[in-house]
Image (cartoon, rainbow, N blue to C red):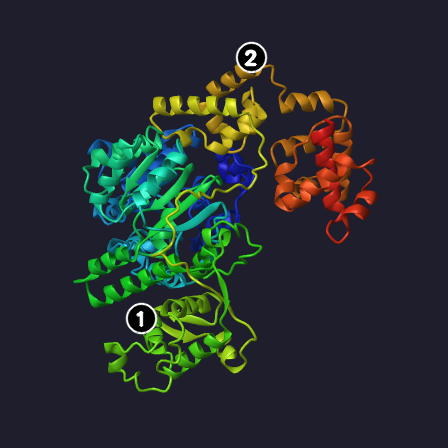
C-alpha cells in the first residue's frame, strides 16, 4: 500500500513497528497532515521526533527539520534510517559534509527519495541552500528545540531568531511545526511570536515523567557519594554534569582510577575526541559520560539510568532537559543534584559584565533553581508548577518518586505567619522581590531596605520571631499553591493571584508548610539509594535477554550504529518474553516493524530458535496452540493480547465486549489450564497491599466463591471487579 493512502495507525506499524500512539502524538500528526501550523510542547522522551517523522514519510515532498547540533542530527538520521530499507530516506546537510556528499544529498532530495532533511539554522541561512530548497517540494518545516528562539529559554541561540525570515524566503505558505521539551508560558509566547505562528494548533503534553526519581543531596563529600552511587549501579549508563571543563576532566579521571568506565566530554575537546567519546558511550563501551551541558542535546540514548548534576544547573529548563535524558525507555531513571550555595555564587559571578537585562534574566532563572533545591514540597510538583502544569502530589503518577515525598520534611502550622506575610506583601504594594520582603519581615536593615525607608513602616520586623529561611520557604510554597506568583516580566516581583486576594479577605483556618532540611548540619549519609521499585508486570527470560543484548552490541558494532538503533530495550524484553522464531512473529514484537525486522531480525530469530530448542522452552505461542486449539478466535486474540500486555479494557473494546464478559472469558481460559499473566494490568489498577490480602485470603479459603470473599474482605474496600481480577490472577498463578 502506498504510504500516502495508509491510515496513521497502518503507517505507524509499517514504518516503526508500534501498534499505538503515545499521548498527543496522533492529534499532532493529524494537524501536520492537514497542513496547519503546529506547536508541540512535549517532555524529553515523550515522542516528539515521531510527531514530524511519520507525517514526513506520509506527505508528498521533503520535510525540513531545523536542529541545533550536528551530533543530534546524525543521531536522528541514523535512527530513522534504521527503520527503513533505504538510507536515502533521511539526510543531514551541514558543515561536516564535503562537496561530493552535499551534491549526493541534494540529488536524493531532487529525485524525491529523501523525506527528511536535517539542517542547522546556519546552513539554512546560506543563499545556495535557500536557492536549492526553492527548487524542490517542501512538505513542511519542523523547528526542533524551538526554545532556542527565546532569550528566556535555557539555550538561547541568536541564529534561531532568523528562521521565520528564512522560511519565508523559501515559500511563505509552508506549514511550520515548532517542537520543544522545555517551554514555560513566557518561552512559549516568545516562540509563537518569533515564528509568526500565533494561530497555530498548540499541543501541550504533560511534563510529568513518572519513572524519574528526583533527589537533591547536600554537597558534602560529594566525590565519595558519587563513586559509591555509580559503583552501586555498576553496568548502568549514566551522565554526570559539571559546570566547568576542568571539573569534568577531574571527575572523569577520579572515576577511572576507581575502576569505573567513564569518559569526559566538553566543548574544549577537538571534534574527533568529542565524537569518539560520545560514540563509545552510545555503543556501551563506557558506562558513564562526565560532561558540561555541551552534551545536553547531542544525545538520544533511551537506556540512561541516572543523570547526576555535580554542580547546580543555571536554570530549571536546563535541569529538566538534562534530567530528561534518563529513562527515556520508560525504565528506571534516577536524577540526583548536589547542592551547595557556593555553586550559586559562582554562577552569579559568571554573570558579571553581561548586559543588565541579561543579568536580570539569569538571576531570576537561578532563583528558581535555588528554590527547587531548597524546597520541602514534592519536587515533581514544583517542576510541573514551573511549567504551568497542576498535578496531584498524593494520587498523581509518580507521586512518591522524589526524596521529599519518600522522606517527608517536618510539617508545621503556619496560618498566623501567612497572615503576616500577606499583610507585608500588601503594605509593599506588590512591588518587591521575595528576598526584600523577608528582610523587612525579620527586621534586617539592608541598604535596599533603608533606601526605600521600609525600616520606618509599622510592619518592619513583624516576623522577626521566625527564621528568614522559613519565611522564604513560606513564599515559595504560597507560589506553588497558587496564592502568590512571581512576575518574571517585572524582575520577579511577588504579587497576589485572585486566590491570594481571597486569602487576605477570608483567611483559611489552617495553612501547613514544610520545614526545610538544614543543608549545613545535615548528617552525611550517602548510603540510602532510593530506586523505582514499581513492578513492571513484565515476565522475561533474563538469560535470553543478556544474550540478545550481547548480539545487539555485536551487530551495532558491525553496522557502526548505537545498540538502541538496532532494537531498543523494550523490544528485546518483549523478545525475551515472547520467543519469536519467525519473521512474522518478530514483526509483532513491540517496536519492530517490517523494515527493522528485515534489516536486523535474521540473527535474532536464529539465536532465539536455537535457545528455545536447547532449553526446551514452551513459548507463549506454543502454549496458546496447545491450550486453546479448539477454542474460538476471540480466546486466541485475548491470550495473544495479554501476551503483548495490551490493557484489558482495550482488548474488550476491540472485541466490542462488556468488561464483565471479558472477565468471564478470562475465567474460562484460566479454568481450562492456561496460565495468564495479567500482572501488568493489575499492578496499574490495584494497590499492592490489596493484592497480598486477597492472595492470602484465597490461600486459606475453603471456596473461590466471590460473594464469600466480598463479605469477608469488605465491600467498602473492594469492588466485585477487583476481586474477580485478583481471583483470576490467583487461579492462574497457583492452579496453573
- Quarter holding the C terminus is top right
Q: In this view, does 538 lie above or below 549?
A: below
Q: Residue 405, image x and y in percent?
A: 50, 54
Q: In this view, does 363 lie above or below 258?
A: below
Q: Quick one: SS at disc 2?
A: helix
Q: Is residue 578 above or below residue 685?
A: above
Q: Residue 234, image x and y in percent?
A: 39, 32
User: Which corner quadrant of the image does residue 299 belong to?
Assistant: top left
In the picture of the structure, the residue carrying the numbered disc 2 is 614
Q: Is residue 685 left or right of residue 206?
A: right
Q: Residue 628, image x and y in percent?
A: 74, 24
Q: Residue 392, image x and y in percent?
A: 54, 58
Query: Which residue sits at x=20%, y=60%?
Result: 349
Earlier-in-chain disc, 1 versus 2: 1
Disc 1, disc 2: CB below 8 Å?
no
The answer to whether one can see residue 361 in this image is yes
Q: Residue furthest left?
A: 353
The answer to whether one can see residue 112 in this image is no
User: Which corner quadrant of the image does residue 288 belong to?
Assistant: top left
Q: In this view, does 727 lie to the left or right of 308?
A: right
Classed neighbour count for the residue bearing mark 2: other residues with Cα under 10 Å, few (<14), some (14–19), many (≥20): few
In the picture of the structure, the residue carrying the numbered disc 1 is 491
Q: Quick one: SS at disc 1?
A: loop
Query: Which residue sits at x=53%, y=35%?
Result: 13
Q: In this view, does 129 lie to the left or right of 566?
A: left
Q: In this view, does 166 lie to the left or right of 198?
A: left
Amino acid at each position: 500500500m502506498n504510504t500516502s493512502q495508509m491510515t496513521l495507525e497502518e503507517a505507524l506499524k509499517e514504518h516503526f513497528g508500534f501498534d499505538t500512539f503515545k499521548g498527543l502524538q496522533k492529534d499532532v500528526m493529524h494537524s501536520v497532515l492537514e497542513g496547519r501550523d503546529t506547536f508541540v510542547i512535549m517532555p524529553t522522551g515523550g515522542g516528539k521526533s515521531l510527531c514530524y517523522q511519520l507525517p514526513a514519510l506520509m506527505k508528498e515532498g521533503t520535510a525540513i527539520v531545523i536542529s541545533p547540533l550536528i551530533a543530534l542530527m546524525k543521531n536522528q538520521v541514523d535512527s530513522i534510517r534504521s527503520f527503513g530499507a533505504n538510507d536515502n530516506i533521511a539526510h543531514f546537510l551541514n558543515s561536516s559534509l564535503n562537496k561530493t556528499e552535499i551534491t549526493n544529498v541534494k540529488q536524493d532530495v531532487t529525485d524525491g527519495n529523501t523525506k527528511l532533511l536535517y539542517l542547522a539554522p546556519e546552513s539554512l541561512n546560506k543563499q545556495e541552500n535557500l536557492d536549492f530548497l526553492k527548487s524542490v517540494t517542501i512538505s513542511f518545516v519542523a523547528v526542533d528545540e524551538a526554545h532556542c528562539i527565546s532569550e528566556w529559554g535555557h539555550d538561547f541561540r541568536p541564529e534561531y531568531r532568523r528562521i521565520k525570515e528564512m522560511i519565508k524566503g523559501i515559500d511563505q505558505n509552508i506549514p511550520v511545526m515548532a517542537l520543544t521539551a522545555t517551554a514555560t508560558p513566557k518561552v512559549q509566547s516568545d516562540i509563537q511570536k518569533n515564528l509568526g505562528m500565533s494561530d497555530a494548533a498548540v499541543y501541550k503534553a504533560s511534563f510529568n515523567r513518572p519513572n524519574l526519581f528526583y533527589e537533591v543531596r547536600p554537597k558534602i563529600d560529594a566525590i565519595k557519594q558519587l563513586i559509591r552511587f555509580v559503583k552501586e549501579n555498576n553496568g548502568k549508563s549514566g551522565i554526570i554534569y559539571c559546570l566547568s571543563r576542568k571539573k569534568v576532566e577531574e571527575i572523569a579521571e577520579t572515576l577511572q582510577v576507581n575502576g569505573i568506565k567513564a569518559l569526559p566530554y566538553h566543548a574544549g575537546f577537538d571534534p574527533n575526541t568529542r565524537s569518539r567519546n560520545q560514540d563509545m558511550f552510545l555503543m556501551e563501551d563506557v558506562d558513564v559520560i562526565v560532561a558540561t551541558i555541551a552534551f545536553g542535546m547531542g544525545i538520544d540514548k533511551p537506556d540512561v539510568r541516572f543523570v547526576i548534576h555535580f554542580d547546580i544547573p543555571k536554570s530549571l529548563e536546563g535541569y529538566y532537559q538534562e534530567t530528561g535524558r534518563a529513562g527515556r525507555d520508560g525504565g528506571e531513571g534516577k536524577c540526583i543534584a548536589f547542592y551547595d550555595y557556593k555553586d550559586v555564587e559562582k554562577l552569579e559571578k559568571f554573570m558579571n559584565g553581561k548586559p543588565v537585562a541579561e543579568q536580570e534574566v539569569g538571576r531570576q532563572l537561578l532563583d528558581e533553581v535555588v528554590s527547587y533545591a531548597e524546597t520541602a514540597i514534592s519536587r515533581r510538583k514544583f517542576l510541573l508548577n514551573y511549567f504551568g502544569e497542576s498535578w496531584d502530589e498524593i494520587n498523581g503518577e509518580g507521586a512518591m518518586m522524589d526524596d521529599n515525598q519518600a522522606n517527608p520534611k517536618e510539617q508545621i502550622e503556619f496560618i498566623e505567619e501567612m497572615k503576616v506575610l500577606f499583610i507585608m506583601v500588601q503594605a509593599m504594594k506588590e512591588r518587591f522581590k521575595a528576598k526584600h520582603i523577608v528582610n523587612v519581615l525579620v527586621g534586617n536593615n539592608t541598604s535596599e531596605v533603608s533606601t526605600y525607608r521600609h525600616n520606618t513602616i509599622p510592619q518592619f520586623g513583624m516576623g522577626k520571631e521566625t527564621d528568614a529561611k522559613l519565611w522564604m520557604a513560606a513564599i515559595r510554597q504560597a507560589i506553588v499553591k497558587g496564592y502568590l506568583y512571581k512576575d518574571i516580566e517585572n524582575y520577579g516581583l511577588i504579587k497576589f493571584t485572585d486566590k491570594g486576594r481571597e486569602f487576605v479577605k477570608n483567611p483559611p483556618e489552617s495553612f501547613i508548610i514544610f520545614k526545610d532540611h538544614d543543608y549545613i548540619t545535615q548528617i552525611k549519609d550517602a548510603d540510602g539509594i532510593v530506586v523505582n521499585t514499581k513492578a513492571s508486570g513484565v515476565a522475561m527470560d533474563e538469560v535470553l535477554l543478556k544474550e540478545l543484548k550481547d548480539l545487539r552490541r555485536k551487530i551495532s558494532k558491525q553496522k557502526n550504529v548505537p545498540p538502541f538503533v538496532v532494537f531498543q530495550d523494550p523490544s528485546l524484553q518483549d523478545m525475551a518474553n515472547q520467543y519469536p522464531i519467525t519473521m512474522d512473529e518478530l514483526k509483532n514484537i513491540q517496536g519492530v516493524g517490517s523494515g527493522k525486522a528485515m534489516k536486523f531480525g535474521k540473527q535474532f530469530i536464529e539465536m532465539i530458535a536455537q535457545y528455545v530448542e536447547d532449553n526446551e522452552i514452551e513459548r507463549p505461542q506454543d502454549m496458546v496452540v496447545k491450550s486453546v486449539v479448539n477454542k474460538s478466535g476471540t480466546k486466541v486474540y485475548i491470550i495473544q493480547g495479554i501476551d503483548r500486555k495490551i490493557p484489558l479494557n482495550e482488548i474488550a473494546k476491540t472485541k466490542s465486549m462488556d468488561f464483565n464478559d471479558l472477565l468471564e472469558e478470562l475465567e474460562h481460559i484460566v479454568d481450562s489450564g492456561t496460565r495468564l499473566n495479567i500482572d501488568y494490568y493489575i499492578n496499574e489498577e490495584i494497590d499492592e497491599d490489596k493484592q497480598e490480602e486477597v492472595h492470602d485470603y484465597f490461600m486459606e479459603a475453603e471456596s473461590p466463591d466471590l460473594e464469600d470473599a466480598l463479605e469477608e474482605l469488605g465491600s467498602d474496600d473492594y469492588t466485585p471487579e477487583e476481586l474477580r481480577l485478583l481471583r483470576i490472577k490467583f487461579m492462574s498463578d497457583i492452579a496453573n
